[in-house]
């Protein structure tokens, strides 16, 4: 699992995605699910720029200190 480090990319993304080599799914956000609102998980032919997102993100397991630093500076 990775976390985006580029604020401009983060601002441009609204939907949630499950992306694999052969299929891509568009998902509702967790807060929509938590509120019990109606929504769908949909297979889509649209392919978001996964490689760009991956290259501009950091690994949650090995770079947690960097994520904490970024999170702290976001709220100051």
Image: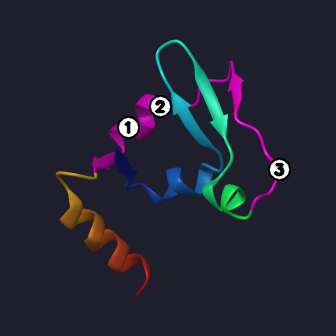
Residue at figure coordinates x 57%, y 17% from the top left: 23
**Is 19 on the left-hand or right-hand side of 56?**
right
* Image quadrant assignment for residue 67: bottom left
The residue carrying mark 1 is: 54
Residue at the spot of label 2: 50
Viewed as shown, does residue 34 lie left or right of 53? right
Q: Which of 63 and 18 is in front in this view?
A: 18
Where is the N terminus found, in terms of image quarters? Answer: top left
Magenta region, residue range: 36-59
Residue at image coords 43%, 83%: 75
From mark 1 to mark 2, how far is it between C-alphas?
6 Å
* SS class, disc 1: helix
Residue projecting furthest to the bottom: 76
- Dots 1 and 2: beta carbons under 8 Å? yes
Q: Is residue 58 covered in magenta? A: yes
**How crowded is the residue under tag 3: few (<14 C-alpha within 10 Å), some, or many (20+)?**
few
Distance (Cα) linking label 2 and label 3: 27 Å
State if disc 3 and disc 2 touch (CB < 8 Å).
no
Q: Is residue 18 magenta?
A: no
Q: Which residue is drawn at 73% across and 64% down?
A: 35
> Could you say which disc has been placed on residue 38 in the image?
3
For label 1, the crowd category at 10 Å Cα-Cα, with few meaning under 14, some 14 to 19 and many 20 or more, is some
Mark 2 neighbour class, 10 Å CA radius: few under 14, some 14 to 19, many 20 or more: few
x then y, percent, for residue 21 = 47, 15
Say if 25 sits above or below 22 in the image.
Answer: below
Q: x%, y% of residue 9?
A: 51, 50
Secondary structure of the residue carrying numbered label 3: loop
Q: Earlier in the sequence, mark 2 or mark 3?
A: 3
Q: Classify 16 as above or below 19.
A: below
- Of residues 6 and 32, the one nearer the viewer is 32
């Amino acid at each position: 699992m990775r976390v985006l480090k580029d604020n401009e990319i983060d601002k441009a993304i609204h939907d949630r995605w499950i992306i694999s080599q052969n299929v891509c799914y568009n998902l509702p956000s967790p807060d929509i699910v938590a509120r019990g609102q109606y929504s769908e998980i949909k297979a889509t032919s649209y392919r978001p720029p996964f490689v760009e997102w991956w290259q501009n993100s950091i690994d949650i397991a090995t770079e947690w200190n960097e994520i904490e630093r970024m999170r702290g500076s976001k709220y100051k």
